[in-house]
Image (cartoon, helix red, strand yellow):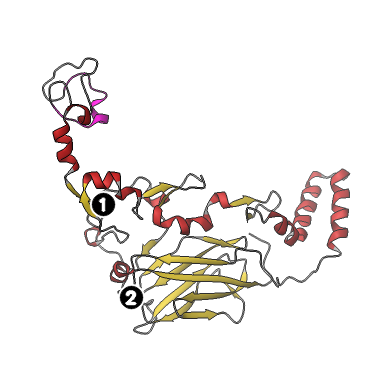
């Protein structure tokens, strides 16, 4: 509030030398916060009834929402007018403005918070669990093959990819055109490789090989995703491979029989793998290796009941077959 009793936004008035309304010149201390000079008005503002900024009818758009959301999105098979599209990930809370600031935003699942691991992303509070498998702070880059490896798994990665690493080192040596210490190191590595198993199929997989994706606010999503429209998961890395993405059709894709929901999975084109998928009481394992470079589809059964608030889809990487080394 200004010395002339006019009220403005603090950020907007901070650069003004005079009151925009009555042109009263501003001196030092001409503007004060309402809480210091007009407590009755401040109490009136705090008692205003408001929606959560993430309410379905709210016009508030979080900064960088397209890049920092929980990576769950609605995919439309047909274009709809913008006026008909409504926010699906919405919060139904309403109350006083003081409760919004003091309580609700500190617990709202739709409010954006910094990633606790410090990767720099802004993530919805309810999407922190889904963000964890793809958080950059959970991975480190192999200096030889540049593959993303989960922190703590680098020793296992070097053992599993020893042959590939030797090939990369040989190629670099050939480019340099000299021998030296690098050549002698390669000879010692070849001696060690002679004692390693040469089979390409991996009998066991380093953790994590399981990823759980929880889709929340199902009643609204069922209404917003008719047959042929899907919900897309964030990308996730399993055993250092990825990203994998799932497309969940709550009411079935366009080819699904009536009353059936559908699930599709896409992954890196170089990989052939066996997977297990589970949704509620439904579970299915692939009996043969599939290349997930093109989406593989599964019929799940009837859509979840409208009373169910969330559904968890579990993807498990069972086994990896021979794969191309071209990434």
For label 1, the crowd category at 10 Å Cα-Cα, with few meaning under 14, some 14 to 19 and many 20 or more, is: many
Going 28% across and 57% down the picture, which residue do you hit?
A: 91
Residue 47: x, y in percent?
17, 44
Q: Is residue 14 magenta?
A: yes
Q: Circles 2 and 1: CB distance less than 8 Å?
A: no
Q: Secondary structure at mark 2?
A: loop
Going 28% across and 70% down the picture, which residue do you hit?
A: 223
Left or right of residue 317: residue 11? left
Q: Secondary structure at mark 1?
A: loop
| Label 2 vs 1, first from the N-terminus | 1
**Quarter-wise, where is residue 168 in the image?**
bottom right
> Disc 1 designates what residue?
52
Going 47% across and 48% down the picture, which residue do you hit?
A: 115
Residue 172 badge:
none
Label 2, label 1: how many angstroms apart (C-alpha)?
Answer: 30 Å
Residue 123: x, y in percent?
42, 51
Q: Nearer the viewer, residue 183 or 19?
A: 19
Q: Nearer the viewer, residue 195 or 49?
A: 49
Q: Which residues are magenta?
A: 6-19
Magenta segment's dominant SS is loop
Going 38% across and 61% down the picture, which residue do you hit?
A: 73
Residue 67: x, y in percent?
42, 50
Residue 49: x, y in percent?
17, 49
Left or right of residue 283: residue 170? right
Q: Is residue 216 magenta?
A: no
Q: Nearer the viewer, residue 193 or 278?
A: 278
Q: Is residue 273 above or below residue 124?
A: below
> Disc 2 designates what residue?
227
Left or right of residue 327: residue 259? left
């Amino acid at each position: 509030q200004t010395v002339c009793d006019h009220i403005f936004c603090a950020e907007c008035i901070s650069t003004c030398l005079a009151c925009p309304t009555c042109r009263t010149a501003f001196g030092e201390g001409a503007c004060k916060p309402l809480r210091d000079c007009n407590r009755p008005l401040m109490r009136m503002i705090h008692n205003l009834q408001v929606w959560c900024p993430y309410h379905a009818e709210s016009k508030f758009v979080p900064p960088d929402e397209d890049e920092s959301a929980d990576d769950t999105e609605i995919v439309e098979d047909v274009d709809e007018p913008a006026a008909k599209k409504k926010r699906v990930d919405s919060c139904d809370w309403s109350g006083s403005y003081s409760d919004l600031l003091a309580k609700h935003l500190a617990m709202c699942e739709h409010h954006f918070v910094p990633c606790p691991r410090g990767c720099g992303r802004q993530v919805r509070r309810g999407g922190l669990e889904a963000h964890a498998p793809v958080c950059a702070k959970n991975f480190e880059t192999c200096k030889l093959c540049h593959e993303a490896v989960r922190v703590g798994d680098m020793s296992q990665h070097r053992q599993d990819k020893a042959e590939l690493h030797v090939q990369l080192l040989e190629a670099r040596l050939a480019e340099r055109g000299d021998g030296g210490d690098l050549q002698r190191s390669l000879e010692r590595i070849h001696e060690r490789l002679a004692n390693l198993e040469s089979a390409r199929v991996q009998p066991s997989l380093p953790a994590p090989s399981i990823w759980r994706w929880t889709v929340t606010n199902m009643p609204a999503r069922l209404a917003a995703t008719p047959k042929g429209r899907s919900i897309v998961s964030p990308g996730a890395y399993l055993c250092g491979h990825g990203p994998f993405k799932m497309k969940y059709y709550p009411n079935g894709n366009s080819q699904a029989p009536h009353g059936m929901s559908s699930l599709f999975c896409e992954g890196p084109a170089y990989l052939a793998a066996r997977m297990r998928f589970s949704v509620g009481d439904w579970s299915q394992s692939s009996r043969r290796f599939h290349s997930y470079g093109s989406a593989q589809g599964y019929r799940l059964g009837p859509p979840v009941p409208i009373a169910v608030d969330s559904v968890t889809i579990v993807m498990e990487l069972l086994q990896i077959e021979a794969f191309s080394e071209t990434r």
